[in-house]
Image: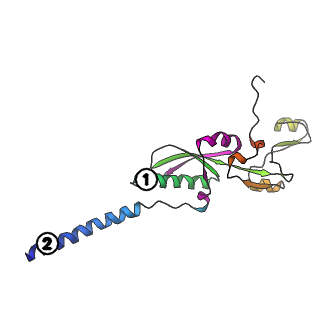
Amino acid sequence: MKRWNRNNRALRLCTFLLLAPVALGGIVSCAANRLSAPAAKVHLLAAEEMEDCKAKCEFIANVTGKSSSLSSSVAYHNALGDLMEHAAMKGATHLFVNPGENAIMRGEAYRCAYCVRPDGRADLSVCQGANATEPGACQVQGGIWMPIARDRASCEAKGGVWVLSDDISRLPDELAPTKKKPGK
């Protein structure tokens, strides 16, 4: 009887030593990654917001997020976090996530920001000194083409204020490209 108890303890100890790393590894791999401060500011877009986004925001890049977790729910969250991190590194303010696998996600990163001129209106590309809407025509007519400010530095150099927008629907309509009327 003593011998059986000793073997039983040895069996329990061996089992513990073999399973403890597996259990601890499972607990560690189940933890979802936390977002950095810039990635936490990236807004996820709903499909209904894409038309406004494409019209008023600047497309930056296609981005990919990956996860190596074996748990599908953790893999989803880690891949989404990685996707948001990549979008933030590119300077995105908004991200549209394309459906994919749990461990690999793809998305479209956009920057929804604009420059507000000193007169309070959204900055647009203009031709100074001539009546033209294209850079080449502006130059031919003796004007100076002033492109739209696409970053904080160029906006502030023009005396404007750089605005990052959380809500695409509130972006000025002036930023949307003019729609051509059919037949013209």
Residue 30 lies in the magenta stretch: no
- Which one is in front, 132 or 24? 24
Question: On screen, 179 above or below 165?
Answer: above
The residue tagged 1 is 73
Which residue does the image show at 74% across and 40% down from the upper left? 176
The residue tagged 2 is 7
Q: Amino acid at mark 2?
A: Asn
Q: Mark 1 or mark 2, which has the lower sequence index?
A: 2
- Which one is in front, 162 or 43? 43
| Foreground disc of the pair 1, 2 | 1
Q: Which residues are magenta?
A: 38-65
- Residue 16: x and y in percent read 25, 69
- Residue 39: x and y in percent read 59, 57
Q: Is residue 11 left or right of residue 123?
A: left
- Residue 172: x and y in percent read 76, 45
**What secondary structure is found at the residue carrying circle 2?**
helix
User: Which of the 4 image quarters holds residue 38?
Assistant: bottom right
Q: Which quadrant is home to the N terminus?
A: bottom left
Q: Is residue 176 left or right of residue 83?
A: right
- Residue 48: x and y in percent read 61, 41
